[in-house]
Amino acid sequence: MNRLTAPLVMLLLLACAAPALAAPKVGDILPDLVIKAAPLPHEAEYLGLPQGVKQFRLSQIKAEALLVEVFSMYCPRCQAAARSVNQVFVNLTKLPQGQKLKMLGLGAGNSAFEVNAFRKQFAIPLPLFQDGEYELHKALGNVYTPTYMVLKAAPGGKGFEVLFIQEGPFADGEAFLNQVLRVSGVQ
């Protein structure tokens, strides 16, 4: 090995040895995340949060289960999936189960400006929140974008149990929504 190759090999070995957060699996318990962003008035109403709240925990959302989309405005797959995600949200809100299963999006690495640009460009009706410093993204295991998770409060108020996870876009919105409703257990 020459003098230039040795440091590169050492860096590669260190990078491979560094612990990486694994994407959560069904059955894992995630923390009760704090969303450090104020919901828009219609988002607060939809989520059952007090008007004017500046930040909130997932556990404060008035729902039996949550469908969370982790997205990025710079993700081409997220952009391509936006119309399908919008339709899932609209269809969910028309169902009786839509009062018990709420949906929201977290913009991994996105500022409030970027989230609002994504919301406007793709006419996103569901509540979207910035995660500019990747805090929530890290707590969710650094998942790819888009990722969809169904979460339900864990027994004893100790965070949220992962009931479903899908990394990558879904092919059929109706089938996806039916699967989400089935695994969420909301009636």
Image (spheres, rainbow, N blue to C red):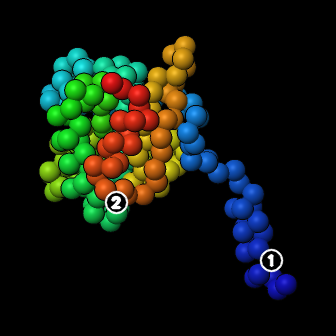
Q: Residue at x 52, y 22 (%)?
A: 154
Spot the residue most to the top.
156
Q: Position of residue 118 (x, y in %)?
A: 22, 53
Q: Is residue 144 above or below residue 100?
A: below
* Image position, residue 147 (x, y; %): 42, 50
Q: Which residue is disc 1 drawn over?
A: 6
Residue type, label 1: Ala
Q: Are marks 2 and 1 in contact (CB under 8 Å)?
A: no
**Is 21 placed left or right of 9 in the picture?**
left
Q: Nearer the viewer, residue 161 or 76?
A: 161
Cα–Cα span, label 2 and label 1:
46 Å
Give the residue displayed 52% in from the left and 49% down from the top.
Answer: 142
Judging depth in this view, the residue of 7 and 130 nearest the camera is 130
Q: Earlier in the sequence, mark 2 or mark 1?
A: 1
Q: Nearer the viewer, mark 2 or mark 1?
A: 2
Name the residue carrying label 2. Answer: 171
**Numbered circles on residues, count:** 2
Q: For residue 185, which quarter of the picture?
A: top left
Q: Is residue 114 visible?
A: no
Residue 10 position, x and y percent, is: 78, 69
Q: In the drawing, does residue 43 fall left or right of residue 147?
A: left
